[in-house]
Structure formats: C-alpha cells, structure tokens
Image: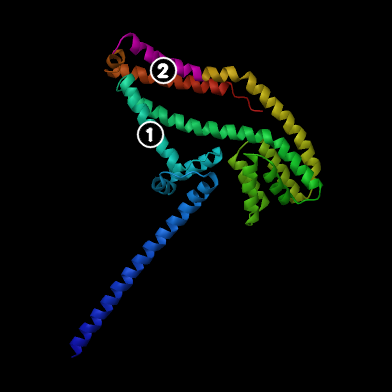
Amino acid sequence: MELNTLITLTTGVTLLTCVLAVAGVHGYARGRAQRAALVDRLTHTGSAAVTGRTRHFRGLDRRLRRTRLGRKLELRLAATGLDVTPGEFFAAMLATVAGLWLLGQATLAPFFGPIAGLLGIWAALQFLTWQRQKRIEKFINQLPELARILANATQAGLALRTAIGMAAEELEAPAGEELAKVADQLAVGVSLDDALEELAARLPSRELVVLVTTLVLSNRAGGQVVGALRNLTETLEERKETRREIRTQLSQVNMTSYAVPVMGIGSLFLMNGVKDGALDRMTGSPVGQACVLIAFVLYAIGFVLIRRMSRIDV
C-alpha cells in the first residue's frame, strides 16, 4: 500500500514537473517572440510608417544588430541619415560584391574576381563615408542659422532647452533632425551636456564643437549666451565662406585622386581588348600575380597620398 502511494506521488510530481517545464518553455518562447516583435516594430514599422516604405531582410537585420559589426554599421548608417537598415545595406553590399566578382572574372580574368569583390566592399564603405561627410558639410552650413535662432530665442527670454526645440522645428534636415533627437533626449531626462556632446560625436566638426562648448559653458556658468552666440554666428559665417573657397580650389586635385586609379583599371581593359587573353596569361604565373597586386597597392597608395596632400583643415 505504501509502495503504491509512493509510486502515485512520484508519478504526480513528475507529471507536474513536466507540465511546469512545458509551461516555462512556452512562456520563454512567447516572451522572446514578443520581444522580437517589439524590436521589429520599433526599428522597422515605426520608420516605415513615417517613410511609407516596407522594410526588407528583417531576419538578417535582427541577426546583424546582435553582432558587433551590425552595431557599428548601424551607427555609421545613423550618421549618414540614410533611410536604410543594416540588414538592407549588408544585403546590397553582398550583392554588389558578388556582381563585381563575376564581372571581374568574366571581363578580365579569374584572378581579378576576388580583387573586384574587395573593391566592392571598399566602395560600399567609401559610400558611407561620403554620405556622412556630405551630411556633416550640410550641417556645418546650417550652423550660422542655428546659432542665430538660438541667440534670438534666448534673447526673448526662452530657456536653452526650449530654444533647441524651436530650432528643431524651424530648420531643415539634417540640423532639424539632429536637434529633434537632442530635444527628445532632453524630454526623457538626459542632461543638456550629455545630449549636446552626443550630437558632436555623431557629426564631428570643429564648428559644431565650438558651438557645443559655448552652449555647455554658458549653461554651466550662467554667462551671457546671447552675446556669445552673436559673436559665434559671425565667426561661423566667415568659416563657411572660407571652406567654400578652399573646396572650390581643391576640386581639381580631388578629381585627380579618383582619376589615377580609374586610369589603372582602364589600362587593364585596354590591354585585354588589344590582345584577347593577355590578362589570363599574365596572371597565370605567380610573378604576374605579384606584379598585379603590387600595381594595385601602388595605385591605392597614390590615391591616399593625393587625398592627404589636398586635405586642408580650417
């Protein structure tokens, strides 16, 4: 009798444990699904509602955001202002690499396939850098107007936080978008110093650093914000004109830096067009492959040196 009671009790405890285990696994899976849906809604659906565009490669995007590479890529995309998710950009980059790889193999020689693929990765990263720099330049051009709006608002007796929100509504992108982020951070309790410093980190430039330093010091010490912003507006206008003149004078040098590697790649197509199969024979030996790699390295060094020599920090 006691043995039957023990067996019944053991069976009941086992069944109860199994039921609790199944319920726990089900609750865990449901929680993960709800969390994934929430992340997907916050990162994709919300922006899609604003832009009216359906997001693609959502699964790839979720997996990519969990990695260190994905987080870095997300930060770089945020700095460019592009309406592209890390998953979409990564998929586009892979498609570009595959296309250039096949194109290099088909038009030149099989040896140039991997080189063309690496060139596709470099071109994608350079595109992000170019977009970010273009956004920074546009933001710098808006800084005089931003300083003027902040000066007028503070002179009218408005708090600096309110003045930033007003500037976010009046200015166009990218200044309006970046200031809207600052205003949202201030609304959830982030300090003014931290919000402005994060803004300077997203769009690094000397002009923005000067503006942020002026606002932070004036906010801490309680100084004359209006007078400082008036003087800063004139300085930013002068720097804007100086940067425009320098960019115009260096435009030819910048075009030369891009023309040098294009001429090298064009010479390969010309060589293969003059004598069909010349590149196959040239890259068929280790010596020929080494020469091609050395030539590409020299072209890359020339591109970097020309860019370095034409860089003038104002």
Colour pattern of the rendering:
rainbow
> Disc 2 designates what residue?
265
Q: Is residue 82 magenta?
A: no
Residue at (41, 15) in percent of width and height: 266
Of the two numbered discs 1 and 2 in the rendering, the one whose residue sits closer to the viewer: 1
Residue 291: x %, y % from top left: 35, 17
The quadrant holding residue 87 is: top left
Query: Which portion, as a residue range, is magenta?
Result: 258-276
Q: Is residue 293 above or below residue 153?
A: above
Left or right: 208 in relation to 51? right
Q: Is residue 263 magenta?
A: yes
The amino acid marked with disc number 1 is Ala
144 or 215, which is in the foreground?
A: 144
Quarter of the image with the C terminus in it: top right
**Helix, strand or loop status at disc 1:** helix
Residue at (32, 70) in percent of width and height: 21
Residue 253: x %, y % from top left: 57, 18
